[in-house]
Image: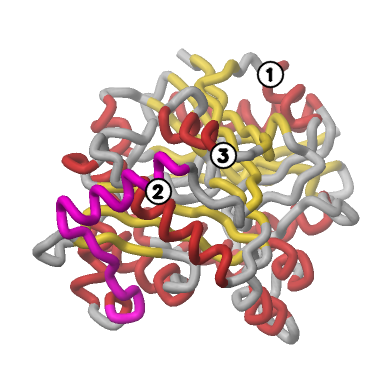
Amino acid sequence: MYRIREVTSKKDLNKFIRFPDELYKGCRQYVPALHSDQKKSLTSVSSLSYCTRRMWLAEDEKGKVVGRICAIVNPRYNRRYNLHRVRFGWFDTIDSAEVAGLLVGTAEKWALEQGMDEIHGPLYYNTLGKQGMLVEGFDNVPPFNCIYNYPYYVRLIEELGFRKECDWVQYRMPAGQGVPLKTERLSALLKEKYSLHFGNLDEIKRNPEKVRDFFRVYNDSFAGSVYNFIPFTDEEIEEEAASVMPYVSDKASCVILDSEDRLVAFGISFPSISRALQKARGRLFPFGWFHLLKALNNYEVTDLMLHGALPEWQNSGVSAVYYKEMSEKARKIGNRWAISNPQIENRSAANLWNSYDHELYMRRRCYIKKIK
């Protein structure tokens, strides 16, 4: 016998955040998020200034947590795409159709009260958060910004009437393989023709206005090319700049400037911190910070996080410039493997890897269901 209870107290929130620690105990692939980051995401991020969200726990008759879910209405998304959708995230459950049904059913009931007619997920408030249920690659360890879930989640969600909305794919590649000769030639041609050159990321990080400009380019570069994209607000830009930019380094990343020193494209990679987060077990103290600091200086495996260009540059071949540069950097820092960020299948962003030695690493899916 199970029951659903809304998260209304600090104690409930702690249970909500820590439930996966127990559910995935002993799972070698699961990468726990830091509890402090989760608390901030659920209570104080700037996205909550426009998003509405509710959280619930599923408990057994003894009061033990057996599942959780968060339902989110993002009015900026719904206005942008002229839809009435609720998104679900932070979805975790034991292998029980009853528990999964109670969790999703509760989210759907609330969504109907908000005037929504579809539910989809797993999704975050905006595009940079964790999204997509894992459907292939269960034996692999995901990048820190990606969801891991047990295989039975797929069965449970599909039995509840959800269907595929879209898939994101991720690839693993030998980082030191270099770029094709065609890419090398195109990079040289574009650099000469347009006086393209590389900016200094350390200088950019010290200049708040240049950091804001970077995220404005991010907004513009993805607005028309990334499925379900939601541009950052000014407040979200400030927040992301504070949390992400300190870890961006010229060692594995690059930004491309034009002849007037305007930022036109970028390629951002991070050293993998997944193993470090596993060792930290959700906590920075007493030793979590040490594992993370050590990982941030180890470039054996990198996560290819963000690659993009301003719309007017997107069909110019400018990606050849940053791929060539990042390939050379990979060799210098001893980078052995690179894991691509999730990209929509069958899009050019995913197909470009066909020019490289690569293998499918993970496939994750956004599910959708009519509720009205």
- Name which residue lies at 38% across and 31% down: 227
* Quadrant for the N terminus in the image: top right
Q: Is residue 125 magenta?
A: no
Q: Is residue 189 magenta?
A: yes
- Per the image, the residue denoted by label 1 is 158
Q: Are marks 2 and 1 in contact (CB under 8 Å)?
A: no
- Nearest to the observer: residue 183 or residue 117: 183
Earlier residue among tags 1 and 3:
1
Q: Position of residue 231 (x, y in %)?
A: 28, 46
- Per the image, the residue denoted by label 2 is 184
- Per the image, the residue denoted by label 3 is 356
Query: In this picture, is 116 found above or below 48?
Result: above
Q: Position of residue 327 (x, y in %)?
A: 50, 57
Which region of the structure is painted magenta? Answer: 181-203
Q: Residues within 10 Å of mark 3 (few under 14, many from 20)?
A: some
Earlier residue among tags 2 and 3:
2
Under circle 3, the secondary element is loop
- Name which residue lies at 23% across and 80% down: 207
Amino acid, disc 3: Tyr
Of helix, strand and loop, which mostly describes the magenta segment? Answer: helix
Earlier residue among tags 2 and 1:
1
**Alpha carbon separation for disc pair 2 and 3:** 13 Å
Q: Nearer the viewer, mark 2 or mark 3?
A: 2
